[in-house]
Image: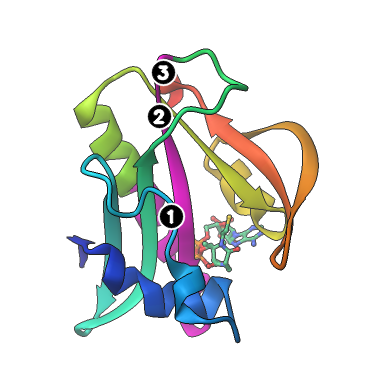
């Protein structure tokens, strides 16, 4: 039910969940088309209902030489609470580990989603900050040995 998808396929789900009432062009994220980036989609009866993107990107907060950033984690509202977010996160972790055992995974988490990531062993770093036109976020991460 999970497979790799293109950047373009993620946009309608990103738009509905993360950028409602905003133009589709705001659903393009920097790094989307880079060779090392991969996008995962969860399909329910051929319909794409959840997406997540993994971009090779360093954050200066961390010393780890190999880092990936999780972006655009989004589950359509009627499919939430059914473990789909968990499945996309675990699949991403598995693929990153296969690439390189030393990858640190980090992301800018919406404050409203901190609890979801904490359940999966992620920790916050630093202080919350505002992403303009979106909402408050905080950096979260998991060390390679914990992935
Ligand atoms: C956050 C999100 C990705 C979680 O996906 P999901 O498929 O609904 O979550 P799961 O069903 O896999 O939940 C796993 C666990 O996390 C908990 N959880 C889910 N969302 C949560 C949240 N926002 N806050 C706290 N806990 C949460 C669930 O209750 C569940 O707990 P349990 O194992 O004790 O039952 C999804 O709700 C979503 O797309 N939200 C809106 C967009 C968003 O905030 N994206 C993240 C941007 S950083």
Q: Secondary structure at mark 1?
A: helix
Q: Can you say whether 119 is above or below 87 in the image? A: above
Classify 10 Å Cα crowding around label 2: few (below 14), some (14-19), many (20 and above). some
Residue 77 in the image: x percent, y percent? 53, 81
Q: Is mark 3 within 8 Å of ligand 1?
A: no
Q: CA distance from mark 2 to mark 3?
A: 6 Å
Classify 10 Å Cα crowding around label 1: few (below 14), some (14-19), many (20 and above). some
Left or right of 22, for residue 96? left
State the extent of the magenta-drawn residues as a range: 65-90
The quarter of the picture showing ligand 1: bottom right
| Residue 133, image quadrant | bottom right
Q: Can you say whether 16 is above or below 72 in the image? A: below
Q: Is mark 1 within 8 Å of ligand 1?
A: yes
Asked if residue 41 shows in the view, the reply is yes
Classify 10 Å Cα crowding around label 3: few (below 14), some (14-19), many (20 and above). few
Residue 147 numbered tag: 2
Give me the residue at 42% from left, 65% from top.
28
Left or right of 46, for residue 28? right
| Residue 57, image quadrant | top left
Residue 143 numbered tag: none
Q: CA distance from mark 2 to mark 1?
A: 13 Å
- Asked if the magenta segment contains residue 95, the reply would be no
Q: Can you say whether 89 is above or below 25 in the image? A: above
Give me the residue at 43% from left, 51% from top.
30
Q: Which residue is label 1 attached to?
A: 86
Q: Secondary structure at mark 3?
A: helix
* Labels 2 & 3 near each other (Cβ < 8 A): yes
Q: Secondary structure at mark 2?
A: loop
Q: Which residue is label 3 attached to?
A: 145
Left or right of 62, for residue 115? right
């Amino acid at each position: 039910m999970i497979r790799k998808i293109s950047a373009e396929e993620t946009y309608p789900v990103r738009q509905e969940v993360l950028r409602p009432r905003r133009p589709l062009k705001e659903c393009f994220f920097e790094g989307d088309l880079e060779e090392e980036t991969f996008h995962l989609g969860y399909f329910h009866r051929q319909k794409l209902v959840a997406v997540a993107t993994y971009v090779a990107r360093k954050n200066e907060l961390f010393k780890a030489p190999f880092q990936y950033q999780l972006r655009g984690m989004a589950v359509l509202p009627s499919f939430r609470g059914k473990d789909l977010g968990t499945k996309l996160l675990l699949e991403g972790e598995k693929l990153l580990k296969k690439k390189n055992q030393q990858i640190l995974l980090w992301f800018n988490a919406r404050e409203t989603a901190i609890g979801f990531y904490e359940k999966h062993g992620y920790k916050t770093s630093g202080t919350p900050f505002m992403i303009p036109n979106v909402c408050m976020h905080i950096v979260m991460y998991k060390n390679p040995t914990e992935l």
